[in-house]
Amino acid sequence: MEDTEPLLARRSERRRLNGHCRWSTRTLESKMVEDFRRRLKYFFMNPCEKYRARGRKPWKLMLQILKIAIITVQLVSFGLSNEMMVTFKEQNLMTFRHLFLKGYKDHRPGSYALYTKAEVYDHMYYIINRYINLQNVTVGNLAYERANGQYTPLTVCQEFYRNSSIDPGNETFHIDPHIDKDCISIFPVQLVDNSSVVSRVNFSLDFKRLLSVRIYLTLKTINLQTVRHHELPDCYDFHIMIVFDNRAHSGKIKVDVENNVRIFECRDWNVEGTSDKNDYLLMSFDSLVILACFTSFILCLRSVINGIQLQFEFNIFFHAYYSKIVSWSDRMEFVNGWYILIIISDTLTIAGSVLKIGIQTKYLTNYDVCSILLGTATMLVWVGVIRYLGFFKKYNILILTLRAAFPNVIRFCCCAAMIYLGYCFCGWIVLGPYHDKFRTLDKVTECLFSLINGDDMYATFLNMNDKIYMVWLFSRLYLYSFISLFIYMVLSLFIALITDTYETIKQHQQDKVPVSQLQAFIAECRDQPESGRYHIDDEPASCCLSPCCCLG
């Protein structure tokens, strides 16, 4: 009996230690779960709540506000410069049309045409004569281009079929579709003796074989209007092409003027009372924009990477503790779309700012590319302001509605697009020959989109050619069915889709019901940002998954 007492005592002590181990394990695991839940809640806090929780200043928030200001100022500055450049190009193009097209008025593009042989020859000689006497005619600062010490010539080129024999009366033709090209060059100094252009220029056209006549010439000028805006004037080379288009062989030769512009820094310049100070200030400001965007890019990229790492930790944690698989919708909660938007915006801004500096230093002339980059970046920056409105509950419900409805809206648009494309192709094939708004496929899409929005309906019905009754009747059935289907059904369903999502989210917010496993898990954490419970190390806590890890 005495021997059994120590044995019983040892068993009792072992049971006590095992019970303490299990209790300690449960306590430790419960603490780890709460710490991880608190860590997740901190991750999804807004910058102001994070500041109250840990006292960290919202540097990203302040940087984004600074970016909105400086990027907008940069865009306005570049926009004014780009506007002057585009206006100067358009005004010069109009000048060239009035200078070189005989009797030109401000016609609608594509409406200037010739119908007789005499008119074609007369207009060609008129262009040559105007080019030769340019300095005595123009009121602008236009000059001839020089290359290797001499003026570049005006070049007249005709394109025509190699061989052809066409007799509409006998309903016969023979044609070689290969195209030949013949050119002559005329220098500005050739006809300074005021002799007749016709007698000095030998150029004949075979209108039955003729496809087109193209006249090439190059003129130089300087954009002086930028001086008033404290910018250095640029030099311009206008490579002008005047086209006589006879490809249709319909008896109507369309005439138009096209130009290609090369912008570069003038070789020798001097502006009284100015210095390079403004250029240096602009480049310094652009450098500040690049620095701010690069810093924002690094901070947001780091946040995205941290979110992805936390996503993997949550997936492992949820599988280990609850034996459940985290859904993709919950996983995507860790990938902050606003940060992705900011990263794209920063990338575009940096590229656009580098191009802008190149344009200011006259090494680059890609105004259009630069304007697209800066314009898109500024648009994304201002769209990102919606994120900060989401910190207020009344605005946040609208943002949540947009985000929740987006997948269904995309699926709905894909279905509606099938019907829309069917109407586009049908309208282009059937109504295209009889209606200007259906002449090309891109015009059809624009016309139908306008009809969906209730724009220009009566004019679309009115302008339909009614000479062919079958086509006219088809057009009425086509237009009435399209307008009724898309306005009364498709748009109504589209609005109902968004309204239903709004009501669902509003009901969830009123009932305070979590809509996902992640939100339900985080909602169990009742610690407020001011509680002081968030002042912990940033190192992720390791998950102890063994049955007992309290004993060494």
Image: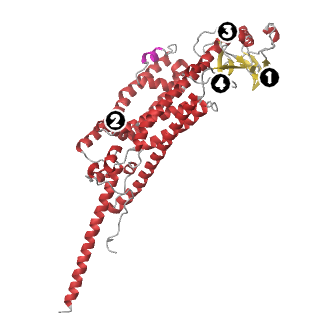
Which mark is first along the chain, 1 or 2? 1
Identify the residue position indicated by label 2 in the image: 498
Which span is picked out in magenta? 457-462
Q: Is residue 125 left or right of residue 537?
A: right
Identify the residue position indicated by label 4 in the image: 261
- Cα distance, mark 4 to mark 1? 22 Å
Q: Quadrant of residue 171?
A: top right
Give the camera-side residue of 399 and 296.
296
> In what element is the residue under mark 2?
helix
Residue 374 seen? yes
Give the camera-side residue of 494 and 398.
398
Image depth: mark 3 or mark 2 in front: 3
Residue 292, above or below 541: above
Image depth: mark 4 or mark 1 in front: 1
Identify the residue position indicated by label 3 in the image: 102
Q: Is residue 327 left or right of residue 342?
A: left
What residue is shown at x 57% (from left), y 36% (from top)?
354
> In what element is the residue under mark 1?
loop
- Cα distance, mark 3 to mark 2? 58 Å
Q: Is residue 534 left or right of residue 100?
A: left
Q: Amino acid at mark 4?
A: Val
* Residue sitting at the far front: 273
Give the camera-side residue of 499 and 52.
52
Q: Is residue 188 magenta?
A: no
> In what element is the residue under mark 3?
loop
Q: Is residue 474 left or right of residue 500?
A: right
